[in-house]
Image (cartoon, rainbow, N blue to C red):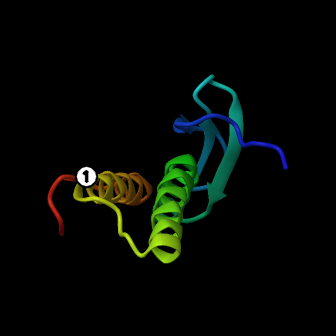
């Protein structure tokens, strides 16, 4: 299985067309990795944010899966610091996908 382009991914901006919205998503090296289009502006913006957040969402999910595997294998949950790191990664990735501000250090 090949690895995806390196993150973070960013939304490069709107492309000119007759639709409500279209964007190109670039990887950390500036290479295009995806594009989004929609007739509905709000959907376009949400789709572009979700695609751009994909590397962070994947990384945060992998952290949590590793945490759960450790707990299932050893019966020992993650430390408070490890749990906070996982929580922060998950909150930041969700905030990027939703386009909201994130205060990752305080549980919500």
In the image, is residue 36 above or below residue 73? Answer: above
Q: Specify whether 20 is left or right of 88.
A: right
The residue sitting at 38% across, 59% down in the picture is 90
The residue sitting at 32% across, 51% down in the picture is 85
Residue 26 can be seen, yes or no: yes
Outermost residue on the front side: it is 74
105 or 48: nearer the eye? 105
Residue 51 in the image, given as x and y percentages of width and height: 58, 53
Task: Find residue 5 and report its image quarter.
Answer: top right
73 or 106: nearer the eye? 73
Q: Is mark 1 on a helix, strand or loop?
A: helix
86 or 76: nearer the eye? 76
In the image, is residue 62 above or below residue 73? Answer: above
From the image, tell me which residue sits under label 1. 81
Task: Find residue 47 and report its image quarter.
Answer: bottom right
Q: Specify whether 95 is left or right of 22.
A: left
Residue 86 in the image, given as x and y percentages of width and height: 36, 56
The residue sitting at 49% across, 66% down in the picture is 70
Within-10-Å neighbours for mark 1: few <14, some 14–19, many 20+:
few
């Amino acid at each position: 299985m090949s690895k995806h382009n390196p993150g973070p991914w960013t939304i490069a901006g709107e492309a000119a067309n007759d639709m409500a919205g279209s964007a190109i998503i670039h990887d950390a090296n500036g290479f295009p990795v995806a594009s989004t289009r929609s007739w509905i502006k709000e959907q376009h913006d949400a789709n572009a944010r979700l695609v751009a957040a994909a590397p962070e969402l994947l990384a945060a999910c992998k952290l949590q899966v590793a945490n759960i595997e450790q707990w299932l294998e050893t019966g020992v949950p993650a430390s408070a610091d490890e749990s906070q790191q996982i929580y922060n990664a998950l909150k930041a990735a969700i905030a990027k996908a939703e386009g909201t501000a994130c205060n990752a250090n305080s549980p919500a």
